[in-house]
Image: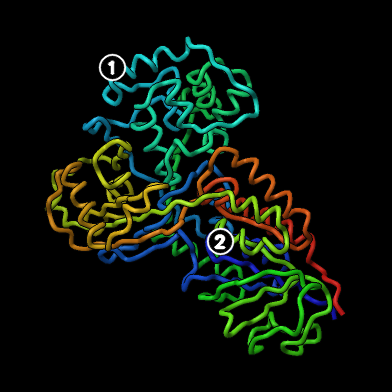
Amino acid sequence: MTPVPRVAVVGGGISGLAATHRLRTRLGPSAEIVVLEQRDRLGGVLHTVDLAGTPFDVGAEAFLVRRPEFTDLLSELGRSDALTHPTAATATIRAGGRTVGLPRGTLMGVPGPDAALDGVLSPGDLARVAAEPSRPLTWEPGSDVALGALLRERFGPEIVDRVADPLLGGVYAGRVDALGLRATAPALAAALDAGAGSLTEAAGAGMAESGQRAGTLAGPVFGAVRGGYRELIAALAAAGGATVRTGVTVRSLHRRSAARGPAAGNGSEGHLRGPRGDEGAPRDTGGWRLELGPASRPEALDVDAVVLAVPAPAARRLLEPVVPAASAAAGRIDLASSAVVGLAYRAADVADMPGTSGCLIAADEPLSAKGVTHASTKWAHLGADGLVRIRASVGRFGEEASLQVDDAELVARVRADLRELDGIAAEPVASVVQRWGGGLPQYGVGHDATVATLEDAVAGVPGLAIAGAMLHGVGVPACVGTARAAADRLAAGVALPARG
């Protein structure tokens, strides 16, 4: 009898589920795949709740449509009809005590030649921006620096605190002073490597490469899933056809040849069978052993291959005994904590709210939130029942203390911000708070080199792959991309394990 491959996917977020789906496609219906998730639900930071009776995402909100990985996945699942795009409402920024339109002509907050920053920067820093192209710039191709420090030196402090930090903070829940140029603004780094004589020129080149300056970008930039990301999570889990186990902690990972003793457990899951189907029997074919559950009730899971789709701290811990170099690299990736507050109002109570898609908030503003989304204005389906829904993000890297309050206090702080920003004093009809402890990896200086070390070390180990937001982008399409690459690598090596 030809044995079937057995694969464990550690992590049930979008990366783990996308890897599972790809493995099923590559390995066929007979493959045994088990998904192990520590939380009591699947989805990771893609999490949909009910806010006043409507599905409302309180993790990732939107995704870049121009990266094809996620839209391709929707198509494969037969769910392209769930894709929706934002309305034409435009965003604002709160800076210098005023709310103004989001500046045009910047590359993630870095001014290009046509940047319009009036009303955002003071006259002094506007002059520094204007003078930057004429100042000598020393740049060593291939180098990396903290983006914030570079912008402060070239443009002054306000461009960092009032423009770049709000924009990048919305992506990474981080501070631009701690983020690396090469990983967070790769187009800027590429232009500098190619010989741009100033940051202004480099930003212009980066925008021209993407079509942003020339106005050639066709179609919407962002998309969302109508009905919330839980629709996608459910479809992915069903299509993957895996054994899904939630509420399970993977305590350790070892090469099977180094494991000792029979596989533990009650034998109720097919993935715990021995080579001849004898429940709990030791296998004699190499591969991997995962130790699950609490030390008082241990369980062992033997498989041919493993995908690790977990945050950096968990990857560091699991990789340490088997790939120490990869473990050390994962240990160099920091995480940021944040929270999302969702509020629903009667339309009559917020009639004077601006008709914008929301507001980014400069780091030097005396407000608690880092950004507010007028969700039912930005996404038409979220206001179809006549209620107005608002989403606020709170917390940046290094500011964990600001989150050490109860949910009621977080809601109160956001409501105070809304009074200041939007003139909303009414009582909401519903609210929800979602906390993300260590929810987003921070792409610091040298992140690309760290990831290269991590991936190279793992690539040298048969039957092991990694995926997730800590690698090549925190957005949903990037996570799907790493998941597919991990699954493809494993599928090429585990299709016909030799057992016997």
The residue under the point 72% across, 89% down is: 279
Q: Pointer 2: what residue?
A: 77
Residue 381 visible in the snapshot: no
Q: Answer with left or right where residue 100 lies relative to residue 240.
A: left
Q: Pointer 1: what residue?
A: 123
State the image coordinates of residue 83 (x, y, percent, origin top left): 45, 53
Classify 259 as above or below 104: below
- Of circles 2 and 1, which is in front? 1
Tag 2 secondary structure: loop
Marks 2 and 1, how far apart at CA: 53 Å
State the image coordinates of residue 99 (x, y, percent, origin top left): 23, 33
Q: Answer with left or right where residue 302 lies relative to residue 79.
A: right
Amino acid identity at mark 2: Leu
Task: Check whether the beta carbons of the residues at disc 2 and disc 1 lie within 8 A of each other.
Answer: no
The residue under the point 71% across, 83% down is: 263
Taking depth in this image into account, of 214 and 161 the one nearest to the observer is 161
Q: Quadrant of the C terminus?
A: bottom right
Tag 1 secondary structure: helix
Amino acid identity at mark 1: Pro
Q: Quadrant of the N terminus?
A: bottom right
State the image coordinates of residue 368 (x, y, percent, origin top left): 27, 47
State the image coordinates of residue 201 (x, y, percent, origin top left): 51, 18
Residue 104 visible in the snapshot: yes
The residue under the point 65% across, 76% down is: 291
Taking depth in this image into account, of 312 and 93 the one nearest to the observer is 312
The residue under the point 35% across, 14% down is: 127
